[in-house]
Amino acid sequence: MIQTYDVTKLIHRGRNALGAVLGDGWYAGRLGWMGLAQYGTVPTLNAQLEITYADGSRDVIPTDDSWKAGPGEIIGSDEQWGEVDDAQKAVKNWDQPSVDESAWTNAVVEERSVALVPQLGPPVRELMELPPRKITRRGEAWIVDFGQNLVGHVRITAHGPAGDTITVRHAETINSDGSLYTENLRTALATDKFMLAGKGDETLEPHFTFHGFRYAEITGYPGTLKADDLRAIVVGSDNPPTGTFESSNPDLNRLYENIVWSQRGNFLSVPTDCPQRDERLGWMGDAQVFAPTAARDADVAAFFTKWLVDVDDGQGANGDFADVSPRVSRPQPAMPVWGDAGVIIPWVMFETYGDKTFLANNYPSMARWVDFSKQRALHPPPNPFGGRFGPRTNVYAGRLILSGGVGDHLASVRTPTEVVDTAYFAHSAQLVAKAAALLGKTDDAAKYDKLFHDITDAFDEAFVSTNGTIQGDTQTGYILALQFGLLPENLRAIAAQRLAENVAQHGHVTGGFVGNGLICPTLTKIGRPDLAWDLVLTNTYPSWLFSVKNGATTIWERWDGWTPEHGFQDASMNSFNHYSLGSIGEWLYSGAAGIRPDDASPGYKHFFLAPQFTTRLAHVKATFDSPYGVIASGWRVEHDQILYVVTIPPNSSATLELPVPPQEIRQSGRKLSLPDGSETKLPLAAGTYHFSIPSRLIANF
């Protein structure tokens, strides 16, 4: 993809210079655990300067063999290993006409037939700077704590003799003896080195690498390291923030901040799974479970528009997506749930922004994935996942049942993968049917709607007993069946009761990547928000607040990344900045604050207000900058009343839904002018409204 810049203000009369500094990056550097050069062996530059003069004439100055190229201060640069810079080798005035290029050689031209398309997503930029929270001397090293797990690099200022080397190592956390904990980085070195030029104060920072870290170990620094000598530079895709959430519970607020920080760090060109170890890939399953939260936290329309092109580019001729996008050298097709991201994320973007382009652009690949899933279910190969994720049986061959992959990844209680995979198969078929209907593809709509019902019948026959028990008897199994509409009407209430009993019995969320984001919306849907609040406010393992209680400043990959009893989990897969379990964030907006989208009116042209009040908190407030403007929803408990204030932006409307009789609700001190009943449904036009509800009634919520 190409980037375009207006450089008019940089051009002046006389001589001008055009230059660039190249790094290996994603293209030629280490990527995932596959090593170097997944897409190309060396970085190249393809550029042109287009000049339009006052008389309308134009000049184009392209890159060709008249350009000069040579080495500079960057000795080596890699996103996983880090960067080595020698300031003594810096080329003076390299971007000025006065540069001495006598030692440089003519550039080598490579002929390539690659389609050039504009970059659709936002640029990766420096987003903010953080000062050190604490600096500690440890032997010959300085240990710097920035107080926040972040993604970026360290900028350091130093004054020392030429050739002195400053080494900066990075880590997310520290061992009990104060040293960096780097085992979870696997083969990623995450180390930057800077050789001083010896010319007074020097500001040093890498050009083509990023690290996931809270702590930095600095050795070789000349003199005493002070807070003013360094900053953590936070980088990421420039996605404008759109959401806020705050409550009277500091731990809940910290959880929300952790979600935002994990999104900020991992939305770097693509939605990466983690920013610190030898991986940093666009894992599809992670992105799809988090997408509804991501679209509340920030404006990700352009970001996902770009990434969905990567997803489509990685689709095979038979319709299989890849587990990671952009696709890397992993021959097997995507696992169920992970590949379903190619269907679910376009739908989430359409719901959020009301733009059918997301569906129109991605519909062909969405349909091909569902067709591929159907063939894989009916004619499963002996082991489509290469043995990596355990044995695969063919007991369901010839039926619309999928099995394999990892299912509800990293759950504390395992749900049979065939239950999870088939539920997602049905969900994707239903979304494709809906997309087809919206795009006027009536034959396709009927075809995929029938497929959805056929999969549902197969799901019920294979996994649902006559007493409503779903195979595995897990929270995630019931969540998926209820949330995706897979149960016959006569078993829905029974399954809802079984889910409620399971949650009450465990007292914790037991699901993993799949279950954790859907459990609170499902509990709210079945009329048990009290249980949702129980889970959200629990701080013992496994829970969202467990990591907060133990000092997390981003979302952990695992519920038990670190525990007081066992210390660090298996270092082979233990990221402390991994947004997947942060998908509870969507419920903080739609449940706790009650801002819920309307499927029939995408883009928040119309939406629902259904806040889930609780006296366990003194107040909750959220805002969301929708396509029509800022929606605000907040409530607080005062004495025997809950005071609720909501703002609806211009050109949109909302419906207030509360399971409270309208005769009990006051609007600006007056009784609602609605017929008496057992619940309230009040249409609201744009404006700000004030309501009061007796707090004694929330026991019914």
Image (tube, grey):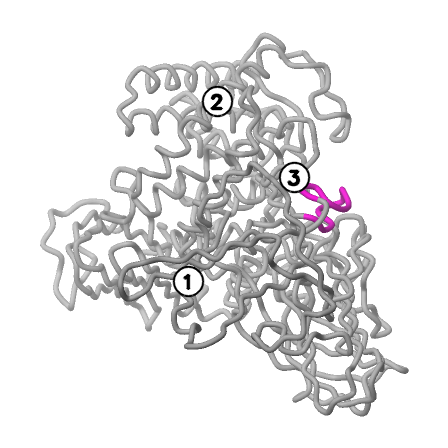
What's the distance in space between the residues labelled 2 and 1, CA to CA? 33 Å
- Which residue is depicted at the point 48% across and 17% down? 455
Residue located at (65% from left, 89% from top): 228
Q: Quadrant of residue 86?
A: bottom right
Which residue is found at the position 69% from the left and 54% from the top? Answer: 24
Q: Nearer the viewer, residue 271 or 637?
A: 271
Numbered circle sitting on residue 368: 2
Q: Which mark is residue 240?
A: 1
Q: Secondary structure of the magenta portion, mostly?
A: loop
SS for callout 2: helix
Instruction: Work out how far the residue at label 1 is from the one at label 3, CA to CA, in angstroms.
Output: 30 Å
Q: Tell me if residue 27 comes above or below residue 150 in the rendering.
A: above
Specify whether 176 is left or right of 380.
Answer: right
267 lies left or right of 689:
right
Name the residue nearer the viewer: 174 or 595: 174
Q: Position of residue 77 (x, y in %)?
A: 73, 61
State the image quarter where residue 191 is shown.
Answer: bottom right
* Residue located 76% across and 44% down the image: 33
The residues colored magenta run 28-40
Residue nearer the viewer, 241 or 189: 189
Q: Nearer the viewer, residue 585 or 656?
A: 585
Give the labeled residue for mark 3: 409
Amino acid under disc 2: Arg
Q: Callout 3, which amino acid?
A: His
